[in-house]
């Protein structure tokens, strides 16, 4: 009989795969907590309507959706922001703003599989709600940079690429475009780098038939630096915001990590201000993270008007980049101590010692069946234990325990009544050094 | 417009609810690691067939199941063991036994809502695969006891109630019952405590028409102690196993926590040996945890014969018990330091200090908008910060920072160039004391 496989687009996390996930999640958690963010979570599925309200009916194509036994339309969550906005909206005026919230949701999208894209994946989500000022955008961009730095990446590895939805709108309107046409142009700009330039030219002519306006639009699209945009859009409120953003990022010491990029539009329609994406330096992978300001979502779900800014970073692309850069840490010991019974009659003493060690927080195992010393040492190796403790034998009769350091093979004798204290100190030292 | 609610039977975890979850999960993780268990995870949904293979077609009634866009039958996972067994089976003979694996899965069951039961919940799962000896059962029962102890529960709060599927079968057959009838009797025994005694008598008469056999069965069911069972089943292999189990638990120092209970059958058909459930002392709540030996599941999915023993503990009942016993810890500080700008022009210095603190791992926030000192102190309170640091003012001009201890209101002055080192030490001390 063939062993069944898991569903397409999902992953089995064996302990050796889980180690990378744990590394990623604990680094994420550390960064969030340093920035004063609090953990929240929502249901794994929501009413289908929640996603349609934000993204339109066509979102169904990307969703796992189904009816429950009472005929309710439900969908596995494809992103966290709708649940977040619903939860904040449900608090109404009682939400104690500003909120600094983070989550590490498991998400589901029924999409074509490709490199860096699975149907089941994890994200880090960080959001600040209640601050309309650009300082919140800066704080979040600083957080995404520190998230990358904590994982070991440098300004040589990645860049945060920043633009603004308001900037585009203001520039387009100043260039003579009608407000209703802006959305079509965002979509076109969003796919500019993904389609041949002739196709782009043709599509642009369709959206902007007026040659004079089109020339101005092309000048905007072609702007190669923020300085150039500042000249074109001199005095526009959105340009002022971006200038302040870059000045704040300089206060954070993060100028090296952030660049202006007119091509960053973000596909989702709900962004209302500054938007950003994080890419590896060569842009060889999909976006590592993306986010921006979305001031209208909480009120869309019936909550009070609530300014908001957030970003999401996925685990799949980041995992690839960690592997590529050699930043995946080695597997940790499964247990610090492995207790070996010198003879079968020592197993009761093995349990007693294991119990004392575990009571002190020292991870510890033993074979759970009678077997020879050689086999037990192999099991200690398989457990990646740092120390093997030999219980019994001639040493045991004299009140001693032989301790073997697995990495070096070195053996020392310790009195039985001191072993727990000594191993506790060694375990503590090992944990500290494993923390980096 | 009304704010939409989440789906029935699910929970929104606001940060204040999440704190209990985090407490539970980190305690679970700590216990598992002390016992040398490694974390794994599987997909959130599996092929529907996986669950039917283990539990029969009637499992559909309890599942959220659906077809994906390609017509595949999928189901949200209602338990973790099928994914575990599938993963281990997929490794075939390459699985390095024994495995000590744990997981904290989010699970879904479409069930009638009642106290302690939701449609979306979490579990701790611990399993040992590859050990046929009763020492693995003892190790897992010790682990579930230590899980409860780490949460603050004592032998006055809970008991592990232990029985054995093999014991029942051996006793029933020794009493003259046909092997085929055993399953019906397990089911009857499982519901004995939940139905009126007349109903039980009537059902028993149906399953066991022979009066002589029935008398023996009633004596088994009525056994009030393990000693009595030992007399009835003297010499049976399963009695020997149970005697060894209780002897091992005594080596672990856990005799006070474990009792024999003939009424523990476990509803699931797949158990093959010792079974156990953890209940609060008054049995006023649903089971806190349950588990046992299941030696045939890995081979059911096409893997090699693999002895296995495991248990699962749910978050909902445990959360209720923690609240009932006053064991829910207080909310932790959202950030250790809150940086206050004495005047609007100090905000750049606030960012610079926050950056230094965060670089040292000290959690830190600031208001992200210009506002008065009184308002900023309120925000520091809302963030449950331990210290407010005043940046600027007369003290700032002299190179000093005023530090206010929020709990006492006490204020001290520290040199700006020493503040990061001092706050790092204070934050470290605070974290150590919060660890208990």
Image (spheres, coloured by chain):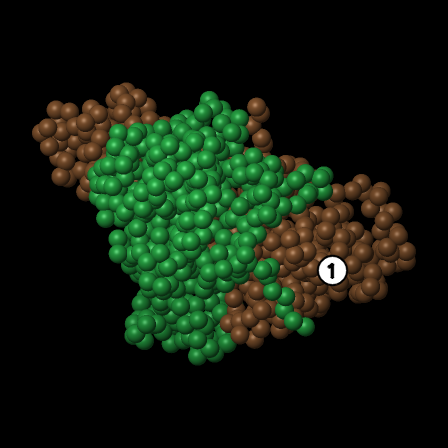
Chain colours: A green, B brown
Q: Is residue A149 left or right of residue B56?
A: left
Q: Is residue A198 above or below residue A186?
A: below
Taking depth in this image into account, of B299 and A392 the one nearest to the observer is: B299
Taking depth in this image into account, of A371 and A201 the one nearest to the observer is: A201
Quadrant of the rendering where the C terminus of chain A is positioned: bottom left
Q: Residue at x 65, y 67 (%)?
A: B301
Q: Is residue B161 left or right of residue B207?
A: left
Q: Is residue B431 visible?
A: no
The x and y percentages for residue B49 are 69, 59
The x and y percentages for residue B2 are 58, 25
Mark 1, other Cα within 10 Å: few <14 / some 14–19 / many ≥20: many
Q: Is residue A47 left or right of residue A290?
A: right
Quadrant of the rendering where the N terminus of chain A is positioned: bottom right
Residue B171: quadrant of the picture: bottom right
- Residue at the limit of the structure toward the left, as seen here: B398
The x and y percentages for residue A207 are 46, 41
Q: Is residue A1 above or below residue B347?
A: below
Residue A432: quadrant of the picture: bottom left
The x and y percentages for residue A131 are 36, 29
Disc 1: host chain: B
Q: Secondary structure at mark 1?
A: helix
Q: Is residue A98 above or below residue B300?
A: above
Count of numbered circles in the view: 1
Taking depth in this image into account, of B155 and B402 the one nearest to the observer is: B402
Which residue in the structure is indicated by mark 1? Answer: B168
Q: Residue at x 72, y 39 (%)?
A: A70
Q: Is residue B67 visible?
A: yes
């Amino acid at each position: 009989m063939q062993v069944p496989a898991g569903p397409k687009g999902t992953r089995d996390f064996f302990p050796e795969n889980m180690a990378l996930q744990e590394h990623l999640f604990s680094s994420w958690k550390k960064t969030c907590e340093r920035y004063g963010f609090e953990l929240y979570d929502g249901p794994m599925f929501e009413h289908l309507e929640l996603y349609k309200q934000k993204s339109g009916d066509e979102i169904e194509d990307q969703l796992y959706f189904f009816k429950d036994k009472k005929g309710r339309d439900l969908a596995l969550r494809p992103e966290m922001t709708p649940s977040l906005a619903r939860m904040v909206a449900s608090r109404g005026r009682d939400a104690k703003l500003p909120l600094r919230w983070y989550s590490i949701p498991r998400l589901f999208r029924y999409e074509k599989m490709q490199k860096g894209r699975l149907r089941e994946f994890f994200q880090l989500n960080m959001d600040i709600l209640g601050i309309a000022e650009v300082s919140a955008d800066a704080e979040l961009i600083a957080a995404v940079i520190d998230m990358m730095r904590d994982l070991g990446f440098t300004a040589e590895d990645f860049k945060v690429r920043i633009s603004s939805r308001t900037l585009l709108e203001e520039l387009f309107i100043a260039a003579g475009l009608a407000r209703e046409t802006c959305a079509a142009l965002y979509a076109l700009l969003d796919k500019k780098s993904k389609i041949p330039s002739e196709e782009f030219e043709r599509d642009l002519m369709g959206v902007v038939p007026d040659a004079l306006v089109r020339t101005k639009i092309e000048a905007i699209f072609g702007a190669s630096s923020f300085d150039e945009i500042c000249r074109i859009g001199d005095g526009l409120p959105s340009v002022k915001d971006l200038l302040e953003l870059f000045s704040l990022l300089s206060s954070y010491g993060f100028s090296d990590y952030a660049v202006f990029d007119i091509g960053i539009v973000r596909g989702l329609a709900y962004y209302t201000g500054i938007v950003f994406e994080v890419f590896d330096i060569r842009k060889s992978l999909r976006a590592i993270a993306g986010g921006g300001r979305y001031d209208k979502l909480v009120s869309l779900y019936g909550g009070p008007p609530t300014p908001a800014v957030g970003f999401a970073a996925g685990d799949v692309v980041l995992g690839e980049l960690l592997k590529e850069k050699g930043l995946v840490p080695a597997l940790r010991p499964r247990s610090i101590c492995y207790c070996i019974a010198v003879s079968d009659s020592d197993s009761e003493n093995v349990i007693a010692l294991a119990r004392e060690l575990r009571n002190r927080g020292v991870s510890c195992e033993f074979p759970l069946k009678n077997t020879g010393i050689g086999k037990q040492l192999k099991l200690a190796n398989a457990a990646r234990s740092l120390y093997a403790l030999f219980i019994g034998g001639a040493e045991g009769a004299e009140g001693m325990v032989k301790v073997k350091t697995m990495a070096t093979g070195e053996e020392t004798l310790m009195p039985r009544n001191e072993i727990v204290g000594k191993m506790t100190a060694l375990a503590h030292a090992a944990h500290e050094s494993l923390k980096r």
